[in-house]
Amino acid sequence: MHRSEAQNYMRPVQDDISRCGSSSRAASPTSVRFIAPPSAPHAPSTAARRLAKHHPLLLTNAATTLIKLLVGLGPYSGQGTPPDFEAQRHWMEITLHLLPREWYWYELEWWGLDYPPLTAYVSWLCGFVGNSRWFALDTSRGIESEGLKLFMRLTVVVFDAVVWVPAVVWWARCRPELESKASIVTLANPCLLLVDFGHFQYNSVMLGLTSSLAFFLFSFQVHEKTILVPLLPALVLTTKSEWITLFSNTAAFSMWPLLKRDGLGLQYIATLLLWNRLVGSNPFARFDKRDVVKLLSVSVYTAAFTLHLAELLIPAPARYPDLWAVANVLVCTPVFFAVWAWSLKAGMEERWAGAPILTTKVHSRANSLSPATPRPKSRLSRVFD
């Protein structure tokens, strides 16, 4: 310790001695205590920082797996009354005991198998691994033991980790500048979390395929869960657009009638709030009133909140029992058409620039444009940016 520092630490002690009375000669040398300099605060552990910096996907997967398990603690579709849970169990039963050529024709009145063949083998594998009593042909119908429910919940988590998560991670690594954000925006999205781990299905096994929003909008008798088909690829492809945030939140709202029936209201609210926090979305923050997508977002979220409140306080009249479900459709459908129009516009712009839609590189024709003289945007472009 330097002399000046020692004097600084001795001064409070000397003052105390003088106040106690007597002269400095009366003070025994042994009464003088040196006050050690304050120790430096403990430096935060670098292990967490190192893990977050070098293995962000590992942390993302661990966090989202925990969320999936928590969502799975809630109720599920068909709890005590079929169909969904019993349908999934029954498909494991018939794929385990019957030949593949019989899978799609066996007792169709009791939840006939409607998964495509490749996914049907997932049912077979679950039945093969599980307890044979849970999947005894014909005699196991309607069984809902605690062991079976735990087994089936865990199979969804395992197949998600084996099939869907690697697909998302692989694609995220193709875009290094968005790797961490793309993965967490996709893996933590409330729509898939609520349908697979709450409602109970194996959609994540099938969703390694890209598809189109047009399929959802123009298909006949699509189910509300079908919105997952265009939504999840869109999340992987684009993580910075306000349009995608609006698309995801509206998709979750469009599934509310299904989730309400399953008793998943708490999970619905919690996953929506968490996901929007993760992507940094705050639609009610101050924004430019000329920002069309922001105005649309605020309008849609206000309408959704109003419908939730009205449904909570006002029962649907007996003459119109589906009033609130129809109102939900009327709010969501225009948004889906707007997002579809935006995606078409974005695709045409990418092709016009001579760049593949899924890359960030701009090829020769785009490079020939001088950055000092950007091409002026049309009114339509300004609306859908």
Image (cartoon, grey):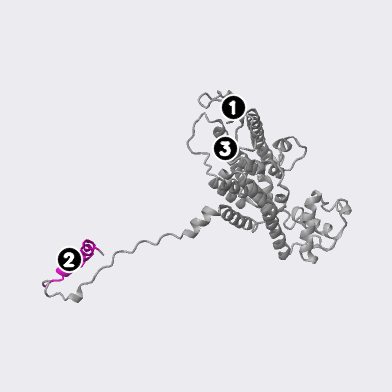
Circles 1 and 3 in contact, beta carbons < 8 Å? no
> Which quarter of the figure has residue 251?
top right
Separation of residues labelled 1 and 2 (CA atoms): 76 Å
Q: Give above or below for 200 relative to 247.
A: below
Residue nearest the observer in this picture, 3 or 145: 3
Q: Earlier in the sequence, mark 2 or mark 3?
A: 2
Q: Earlier in the sequence, mark 1 or mark 2?
A: 2
Label 2 packing within 10 angstroms: few (<14), some (14-19), many (20+): few
Q: Residue 205, position in %: x, y?
A: 72, 51
The picture quadrant where one finds residue 145 is: bottom right
Q: Residues within 10 Å of mark 1 (few under 14, many from 20)?
A: few
Is 140 inside the magenta-drawn segment? no
Q: Amino acid at mark 2?
A: Asp
Badge 2 is on which residue?
15
- 10 Å crowding of disc 3: few (<14), some (14-19), many (20+): some
Asked if one can make out residue 106 in the rendered structure from this viewpoint, the answer is no
Magenta stretch, main secondary structure class: helix
Residue 237 figure quarter: top right
> Any mark on residue 381, and which?
1
Q: Which residue is mark 3?
A: 242
Check if mark 1's residue and mark 2's residue have beta carbons within 8 Å: no
* Any part of residue 88 in sight: yes
Q: Secondary structure at mark 1?
A: helix
Q: Position of residue 361 (x, y in %)?
A: 60, 35
Question: In the image, what residue occupies the spot 50% across and 58% down?
Answer: 48
Which residues are the magenta region? 2-22
Could you tell me how far apart the alpha carbons at marks 1 and 3 are, in whole angstroms?
15 Å
Query: Which corner quadrant holds the C terminus?
Result: top right
Question: In the picture provided, is 379 more to the left or to the right than 138?
Answer: left
Residue type beneath disc 3: Glu
